[in-house]
Image (cartoon, helix red, strand yellow):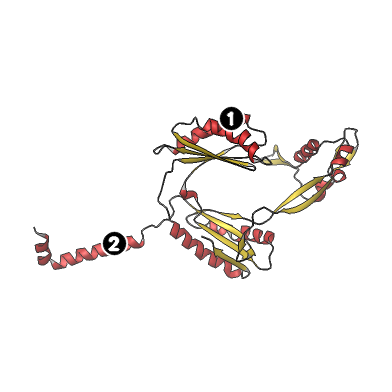
């Protein structure tokens, strides 16, 4: 039957059909997921290794070149590039299109294990990452506060903000970066240490061996079992200062006799400013398959609720 003739004879039916299509199209359009990038399987992987205290030339010779040599033997490799910088090495491996990246990265890890023993002792075990646009943060929030130091602000965000953002539907995790990190530093007087006949390695081993919590087994008493733990971690600076040990001559001395123990804030070489003020940042990583727009909307609403009771907190969306 001719469509035009049917439409003339059945105008109500045709109108109802068109109306149904319009309603379904409107509902589908409103629920259509929107994302920044399509799902892509890029044939690129990166091997990264850190070598603290080493210069670019040492990193290239001792770390980068062995990694390049062994990663070049992986199947379906198209190109290998590397960047050696102070304290770190990065080797970028490009594969042919169609390569199964799960097996390719597994093969890379196996090859790296073959040369790990030949790398310098100060090199941490190299890590392998696939290049995946979906693992990039979908949001970055800059946060500052008036009248609060960065250490206090960092503790507040860790306790009150990050946990609430991570509980949102579609959020995989929220990473807080920036700000100082409190650490204990032991400044050793080398001349006094040598005068007592103690080496620096002996002092390091002493501190490492005393700062441990160890399991002590299980004690059964009737129908109950008690887990025994040996707690030895330092709880204060005075415990470190008053830690005593014997020298090669049999003399008992304390750590405070050969070193100064202080709690300091480790200021990193990178600084973040928000509208001219020192700030911290929170990066939001979405779950696999979650919609970027919906996740961003939930984060914005949650941030509005969180900051209602924190009037001194200023924040802005970097991207």
Q: Is mark 2 on a helix, strand or loop?
A: helix
Q: Residue shown at 77%/37% (left/top)?
A: 205
Looking at the image, the residue that sits furthest to the front is 57
Q: As rendered, which of 209 and 62 lies closer to the eye?
A: 62
From mark 2 to mark 1, how far is it between C-alphas? 58 Å
User: In which image quadrant can residue 313 be found?
Assistant: bottom right
Q: Which residue is drawn at 12% across and 64% down?
A: 7
Nearer to us: label 2 or label 1: 1
Residue 82 is situated, as x and y percent measured from the top left of the image, at 55, 39
Residue 25: assigned label: 2
Residue at disc 1, secondary structure: helix
Name the side, left or right, on which 231 lies relative to 317.
right
Q: Earlier along the polypeptide chain: callout 2 or callout 1?
A: 2
| Image quadrant where residue 272 sits | bottom right
Vertical position of residue 186 compared to residue 105: above or below = below
Inspect this view and state whether residue 248 appears. yes
Whole-percent x and y of residue 169?
48, 57
User: Is the N terminus in the top left, top right, bottom left or bottom right quadrant?
Assistant: bottom left
The picture places residue 312, in percent across and down from the top left corner, at 63, 69
Where residue 146 appears, as percent x and y from the top left, is 66, 68
Query: Circle 1 is placed at which residue position?
Result: 115
- Does 3 sit left or right of 124 as displayed? left
Q: In this view, does 226 lie to the left or right of 202?
A: left
């Amino acid at each position: 039957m001719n469509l035009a003739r049917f439409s003339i004879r059945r105008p109500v039916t045709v109108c109802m059909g068109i109306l149904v299509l319009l309603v379904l199209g409107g509902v589908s359009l409103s629920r259509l997921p929107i994302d920044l990038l399509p799902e892509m399987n890029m044939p690129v992987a990166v091997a990264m290794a850190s070598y603290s205290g080493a210069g670019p030339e040492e990193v290239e010779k001792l770390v980068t070149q062995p990694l390049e040599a062994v990663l070049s033997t992986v199947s379906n490799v198209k190109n290998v590039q590397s960047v050696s910088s102070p304290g770190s090495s990065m080797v970028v491996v490009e594969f042919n299109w169609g390569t199964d990246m799960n097996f390719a990265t597994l093969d890379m890890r196996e090859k790296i294990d073959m040369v790990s023993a030949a790398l310098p002792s100060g090199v941490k075990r190299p890590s392998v990452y696939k290049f995946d646009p979906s693992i990039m943060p979908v949001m970055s929030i800059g946060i500052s506060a008036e009248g609060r130091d960065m250490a206090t602000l960092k503790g507040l965000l860790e306790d009150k903000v990050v946990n609430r953002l991570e509980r949102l539907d579609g959020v995989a995790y929220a990473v807080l970066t920036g700000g100082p990190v409190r650490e204990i530093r032991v400044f050793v007087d080398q001349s006094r240490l040598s005068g007592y006949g103690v080496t620096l390695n002996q002092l390091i081993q002493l501190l490492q061996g005393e700062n441990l919590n160890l399991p002590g087994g299980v004690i059964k008493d009737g129908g109950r079992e008690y887990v025994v733990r040996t707690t030895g971690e330092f709880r204060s600076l005075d415990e470190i200062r008053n830690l005593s040990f014997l020298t090669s001559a049999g003399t008992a001395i304390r750590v405070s006799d050969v070193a100064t123990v202080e709690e300091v804030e480790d200021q990193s070489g990178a600084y973040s400013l928000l509208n001219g003020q020192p700030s911290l940042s929170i990066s939001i990583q979405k779950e696999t398959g979650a919609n970027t727009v919906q996740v961003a909307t939930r984060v914005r609403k949650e941030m509005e609720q969180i900051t209602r009771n924190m009037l001194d907190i200023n924040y802005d969306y970097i991207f």
